[in-house]
Image (tube, coloured by chain):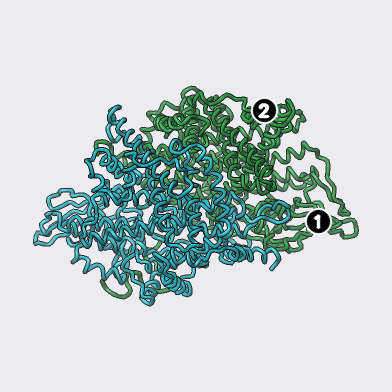
Chain colours: A cyan, B green
């Protein structure tokens, strides 16, 4: 080992030695809801069990093709089931910490993920109690492996436009069946995860045509698609993988064509509706609380995306911050010693914002998931504490947060990758898989560019209630909701932001004022276009879409900052101090970036001052940057990155990965069509 | 073909029929420098010849592994050489239109690209005339296939820190050799394109240790690395591919270790320096003009990156705009007809800005390349017209433009991909290869986050000259330079922007004022930190890096807008009108995005007004959007995209790609480690 090598392996340890922060105390907060170290120990136990098992090795992933990655992952799935039993991990609820720890510990994509993540939850939500008794035990031991087949080739997630049909047919003797068809090319089910090769059963979303031939809109049907013994497609079923994607290729997103596929009457999900043996369609009990609970279950996925945005971005910043502490470029003032990249303010400006966002989304994601669970509990208990505005408010919050966090994380991961220079382009850096797999998140579960409309519909309702509603009406329906702060803003009851943005209180006021102003303007603009200019609402709505995106972001920022500030309470003194710096940095960088939004809200001098303030905060974060990423507690096994190694010994790892590439299996590859070595062509030099 | 299918294949033709624009007239301008249709015809002839040759098929690319893609591309390289001869394409200069057309026509990455693009140009620049006589003919017929081996594993492109050594050794009989070594792991040459498998020769950048043992800094050496007959590595050479990357995997970026590799004395590039048989090092004639010309040659790569940013972004917008005209989602006001995505203002806001940028960068790239070529000609002719500031100015312009355009194109391509929803995630969409291959551009040839310092060094020099220089000094040195506008700004001789931003003139003034203000502030801030706060310059400089990035962007925007406006002259009336709309949209979206920069430059009402104006312009672009992407004239062969097909028949193509995926070669894949079908495990349902 030469001098330079010895040097760069020492850098991270030096960084760690000079920080006053104890990373484990932060880890404990991130793992649990408070400072309980037990949750961290349990997670580490689960991760260790996975890491020690050779089946879970990811070492040669870069040189495997799709089929090899997929079949490897199937093997991992089977081993994971055994491990779950051994470690006593409850697989029945995909939001439980142990489940999340086990799945994440593999650092690979499980083709069975949508079974646990979508199929089982939708069975619990949509099937009647009797139906659940049949299907859930079979799901649990994976005799049934399911997927959720909604989107179609020509229609994305526009549920109203789905073409797949399930037609009621009586056998005239009291028995009845559903006949399922995808009548057109564009109605081919397309995209569902786990559908292509893994699942033997699909929850198919189809238009229900009842016994009288009436189209009752889309409903859910459990359709066996592969033989439960041979795993071959059943009659009338054409199923397969949809082809290579930019990432996530271990997963078999699939297509499904149905041609007169028959399933029993009882394979329709009958919790909320019922079709009897004569084909009569009727709504069923369950009540509004049960429907609300079902809705909350579906919303969990968005809440998980918020938290996972934090986690994925945390992985990217861990790699980038560590490598930036190892890597040197350029010279110091005396022109002798090369400078750690991490000392450049420009690099700090790129990375520390993402570091702050990682914590912010992680904490915010947990807070919103907690609220979902609490609301669910209130509904189950019938406590009556769930207000009229709550469901809409949760919908608005989750839509705004999902769009904001998944967008910021996708951009942020790529930014961290670029911040690693050329080596960030290597698969060995860990970024390509992290990034390309993550890139699905801005699109799935509501496209980030469509969600703002959902947010604005709710906020406009609040606006109307605040302005037009009778005395106390808005308070009764909305007090305690996430969006309630907007009432004061639109009524202009809140003080100005003249106090400046020195404290967190002032910053939160600033963001609230921005959101309020954007909401009032949106309302006025719509009114103007419809009322004064005589447009129909659809046209006016369309012209306001860009403004809606702004409002949605502004609302998300208020919620995130609120959760971030509240989350600070969980840390002990030394750690809280640095988390406060991160929180402040996060907020100020938004003011810096969106400065145009604050014109007229605060003075020009305040906006100008923010830039200097940001640079000052970067200097404070710099001192503990490495420890702050250590605190995320990702093992090398999970990061899969030569650049992000805990010990900083990056260069031998890069070379090792290079030597293993299939391109190096032969010294000379010959062109496949025209024979003869390139550069030779028969002649001597 | 069902009704929906018939419908979506009609949509693009309907779009085309209702636009008053003739796309071919725009194509002619883009192809040539004016309206000459011959250049378009020639390009199409070359593309046709490539397309018709089965060797160049890209049809199964998605299912080939790295080695297969690479060896296929080697075959294409050989066929390309024949085709060049047949079509009379001059391969001697990689900036000639015919060369560019031929390489682009393959719609694949040639592993020999760096031979033409870096090795040959550097031979022409750095070798003495006698040396060129030996090497260039061998390069031309590819007996020698070269690469440019500069970057090292531990050092990126920090040339001063390179560790590779070339040590002079005399044989005592008047003969002499160079002994080359990469003495450490970190000095392993790493990244050079074409090095891994394709090249048999490398231009190695190494520290020259002369006969007296003095380190003369980095110089260039031609080093044969593979046997010219067997293509096997030569003694002392370890060479190979650096492993999989996020994209560009057809290219064999390579690593190279040198262990006492001996080459003749004359393999050192001796145009500007000389080492004689006794190891005496001396500077050589050639004069400052020759050195400048050499420098200009190296700068061509950056100019090409600017133009290619336009071209790559144009591909992305072509796919996204066409697919957005084909794809429907949601319902119109009457709730009956599904709406084309392209009619949503939010989608227009995303895509049309990138459409405008495509034109802007394309036109700007050509303008800056033209200026480079003209400067070169002036130097060769010794006209004396090249001013003192010219070289620095060109350096600043190219650095600013390279950083701005490649960054915006990378973000823009990804944004276009996201704008295609789920299907944009498919390899069949064409985006994954387009994006991941493009993503190297923000990093290569000067990292986008390092370049602003280069820009600001020059602009600060101008500032000093403008403020401190004697009467007329700044005019003499800098008049006519790109950055000359800043003189008026920093001297506050220019009028305000009170006139508003209605015309292009006002907008240009606004951007100039912003750049001027940022430059003055940067100067003041540095002075304050060094003068008042007593920092050393390196420390002060570091604290200003974020501001420098802003200034560099602001400068790039001024140059791009200037070129865009000048480029409008090339179009005929009808086409010019829509190009003016695009130009205006491009500028206003920047004001919208960077609003904070304009606070205090123009009134709040102006900034507010911009948002409405943007929405209005989007409506105008909408009418001709499809024709405006048609005008880029990319064939389906070049786009390789199911979504971007000229005829809009996207869905059958997506399905076709899915069916061909290797995952569908077998109905059932079994886990490789644990046997037994997933979901079965021996038990019946």
Q: Residue furthest bottom?
A: A86
Q: Nearer the viewer, residue A254 or A596?
A: A596
Does the image show residue A262? no
Number of numbered labels in the structure image = 2
Q: Tell me whether the residue at label 1 lies in contact with that at label 2, contact meaning CB atoms closer than 8 angstroms.
A: no
Specify the label residue B480 is tagged with. 2
Secondary structure category for the residue under label 1:
strand
Residue at 37 percent across and 38 percent down: it is A517
| Above or below: residue A561 compared with residue A68 | above
Q: What whole-number distance in Å separates the C-alpha atoms at marks 1 and 2?
A: 43 Å
Does the image show residue A179? yes
Q: On what subunit does the disc labeled 2 rest?
A: B
| Above or below: residue A143 compared with residue A448 | below
Give percent across and percent down for residue B119: 69, 48
Q: Nearer the viewer, residue B358 or A670?
A: B358
Q: Which image quadrant is residue A274 in?
A: bottom left
Give percent across and percent down for residue B135: 75, 47
- Of the 4 image quadrants, the one containing the C terminus of chain B is bottom left
Give percent across and percent down for residue B418: 42, 46
Q: Which residue is mark 1?
A: B209
Residue neighbourhood size for the residue with mark 1, other residues' Cα within 10 Å, grouped as few (<14), some (14–19), many (≥20) = many
| Mark sitting earlier along the chain (1/2) | 1
Residue at 29 percent across and 45 percent down: it is A458
């Amino acid at each position: 080992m030469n001098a330079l090598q010895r040097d760069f392996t020492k850098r991270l340890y030096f960084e760690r030695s000079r920080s006053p922060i104890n990373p484990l105390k932060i880890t404990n907060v991130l793992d649990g809801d408070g400072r309980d170290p037990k949750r961290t120990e349990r997670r580490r136990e689960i991760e260790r069990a996975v890491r020690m098992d050779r089946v879970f090795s990811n070492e040669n992933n870069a040189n495997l093709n799709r089929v090899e990655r997929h079949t490897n992952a199937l093997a991992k799935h089977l081993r994971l089931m055994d491990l779950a039993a051994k470690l006593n991990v409850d697989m029945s609820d995909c939001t439980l910490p142990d489940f999340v720890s086990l799945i994440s510990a593999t650092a690979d994509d499980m083709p069975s993920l949508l079974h646990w993540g979508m199929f089982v939850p939708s069975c619990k939500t949509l099937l009647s109690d009797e139906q659940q008794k049949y299907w859930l035990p079979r799901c649990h031991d994976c005799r049934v492996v399911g997927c959720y087949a909604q989107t179609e080739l020509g229609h994305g997630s526009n549920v109203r436009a789905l073409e797949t049909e399930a037609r009621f047919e009586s056998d005239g003797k009291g028995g009845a069946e559903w006949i399922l068809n995808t009548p057109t090319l564009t109605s081919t089910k397309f995209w569902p995860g786990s559908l292509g090769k893994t699942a033997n059963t699909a929850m198919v979303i189809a238009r229900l045509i009842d016994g009288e031939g009436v189209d009752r809109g889309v409903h859910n049907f459990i359709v066996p698609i592969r033989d439960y013994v041979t795993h071959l497609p059943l009659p009338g079923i054409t199923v397969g993988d949809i082809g290579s994607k930019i990432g996530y290729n271990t997963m078999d997103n699939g297509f499904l064509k149905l041609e007169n596929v028959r399933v029993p009457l009882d394979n329709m999900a009958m919790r909320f509706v019922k079709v009897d043996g004569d084909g009569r369609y009727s709504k069923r009990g369950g009540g509004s609380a049960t429907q609300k609970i079902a809705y909350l279950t579906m919303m969990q996925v968005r809440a998980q995306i918020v938290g996972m945005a934090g986690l994925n971005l945390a992985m990217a910043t861990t790699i980038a911050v560590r490598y930036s502490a190892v890597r040197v470029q350029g010279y110091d003032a005396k022109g002798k010693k090369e400078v750690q990249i991490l000392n450049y303010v420009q690099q700090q400006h790129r990375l520390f914002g993402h570091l702050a966002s990682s914590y912010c989304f992680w904490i915010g994601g947990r807070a919103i998931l907690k609220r979902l669970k609490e609301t669910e509990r209130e509904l189950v208990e019938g406590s009556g504490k769930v207000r009229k505005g709550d469901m809409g408010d949760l919908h608005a919050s989750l839509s705004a947060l999902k769009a904001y966090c998944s967008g910021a994380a996708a951009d942020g991961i790529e930014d961290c990758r670029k911040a690693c220079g050329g080596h960030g382009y290597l698969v060995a850096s860990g970024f390509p898989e992290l990034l390309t797999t993550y890139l699905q998140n801005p699109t799935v579960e509501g496209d980030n560019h469509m969600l703002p409309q959902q947010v604005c519909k709710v906020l406009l309702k609040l606006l109307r209630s605040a302005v037009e509603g009778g005395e106390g009406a808005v308070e009764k329906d909305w007090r305690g909701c996430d969006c309630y702060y907007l009432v004061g803003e639109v009524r202009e009851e809140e003080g100005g932001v003249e106090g400046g943005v020195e404290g967190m209180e002032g910053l939160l006021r600033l963001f609230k004022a921005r959101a309020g102003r954007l909401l009032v303007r949106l309302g006025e603009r719509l009114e103007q276009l419809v009322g004064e200019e005589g447009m129909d609402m659809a046209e006016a709505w369309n012209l306001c879409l860009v403004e809606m995106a702004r409002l949605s972001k502004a609302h998300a920022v208020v919620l995130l900052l609120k959760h971030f500030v509240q989350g600070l309470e969980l840390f002990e003194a030394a750690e809280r101090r640095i988390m406060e710096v991160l929180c402040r940095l996060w907020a100020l960088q938004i003011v810096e970036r969106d400065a145009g939004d604050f014109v007229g809200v605060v003075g020009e001098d305040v906006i100008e001052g923010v830039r200097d303030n940001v640079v000052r905060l970067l200097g404070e974060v710099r001192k503990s940057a490495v420890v702050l990423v250590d605190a995320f507690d990702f093992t090398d096994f999970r990061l899969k990155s030569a650049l992000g190694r805990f010990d900083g010994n990056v260069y031998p790892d890069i070379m090792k990965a290079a030597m293993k590439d299939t391109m190096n299996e032969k010294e000379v590859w010959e062109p496949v069509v025209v024979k003869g070595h390139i550069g030779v062509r028969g002649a001597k030099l």
